[in-house]
Each structure stands twice: as structure tokens, then as C-alpha cells.
Image (cartoon, rainbow, N blue to C red):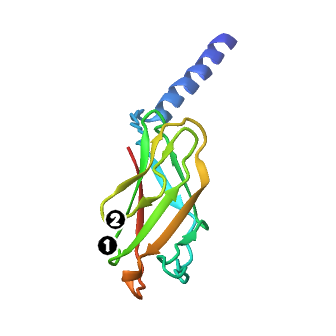
Amino acid sequence: MRKLLFCSILLCFVLGEAALAGELFRQNITYQILPISEIWVSGNPPALVVNSATAGQQPGEATDSATTYGFSTNTWDIPKKITGKINESMPDSTYLKVNLFPSTGANSGGDVTLTTEPKDLVTGIYDPGDPDWNLPITYKFGAAVEAGLVSGVRTVTLTYTE
């Protein structure tokens, strides 16, 4: 009798559990990590001012190395590069150059004169490991005597790409 009572109670729990469980539904979750390549700079450099020259020579060059850059990616197996350009041409007889210090194993283009067309600044970025931060940027602004008195603002666009 005890056995029958125990089995009856057990059967009620099992059937009751099934009745309370409701309908079962499963979902398939699709996931993906897309390529990520990001570049950042520490801010804007101060004004580049040419204000000296030696008699009989061209004016001096204004130089600034106050800013830094960094980048990160999740696709280290694909070589990357950094290009640079300005939003509009420099005035006649003037130039703006940029030099990005390369990360480990990469190659710098040195002092590259910026134009409205993208120019390679750093190539061969193919280095597994942690992101590179605070790499130096040097800007140089110069002019020939023929430039006269000029001033302006140019926007430099740095692009980190394959």
C-alpha cells in the first residue's frame, strides 16, 4: 500500500510538472565579429608660425611634436597602413609636412608633404600584440619668401586602412 501511495504521489508530481512546463522553444543565435581598425590622435597641435629668417635665405620652418597618435585592430594578420591628406591645398609657396613615428616593425614615410590626395605615412603595420598608443607626430610648416604674409587652417585626415 505504501508503495502504491508513493508511486501515485510521484506520478502526480511528474504529470503536474509536465503540465506546468508549457511549450518548449529553442532559438539559434548568430554572432559575428567584424574587422575593427581604429586610429586616434591626442588633439590639435598649436599654431605653426614662421617668424624668422637669416638674411639672404628662405624663412625658417615651424615645427611641432606636441601630438601623438595610436591605433588598434582585431585583424593583425592583414597588413595595414596610415595615410594622410589635407582638406584643401596649401597657399602658393608654402607646405605642410607630417611625420608619424612608426610602430614596431612598420615603416615611416618620413617627412611627407601633405596634399588633398592621400599619401602613405606609415606602411607595413603588421605587428601582433597590444594596441600601439602615444606614437609621436611631427608637423612642419614652411614657406618661401614669395609666399608673403599668409595664414589659414587646414584639416589633416589620417586614415588607418588595409
Return the disc, 1 or 2, that comes first in the chain's sequence: 1
In the image, what residue type sits under mark 1? Ser
Residue under circle 2? Answer: 115
In the image, what residue type sits under mark 2? Thr
Residue 42 in sight from this viewpoint: yes
Q: CA distance from mark 1 to mark 2?
A: 6 Å
Q: Is residue 126 above or below residue 103?
A: above
Q: Which of the image's four quarters has the C terminus?
A: top left
Q: Residues within 10 Å of mark 2 (few under 14, many from 20)?
A: some
Task: Say left or right for 87 vs 56.
Answer: left
Residue 148 on image: x %, y %: 39, 86
* Secondary element type, mark 2: loop
Q: Residue at x 66, y 11 (%)?
A: 3
Q: Is residue 126 above or below residue 66?
A: above
Residue closest to the eye, 64 or 161: 64
Q: Residue furthest right?
A: 2
Q: Residue at x 45, y 64 (%)?
A: 97
Residue under circle 1? Answer: 89
**On the image, which quarter does residue 151 sit in?**
bottom left
Residue closest to the eye, 57 or 5: 57
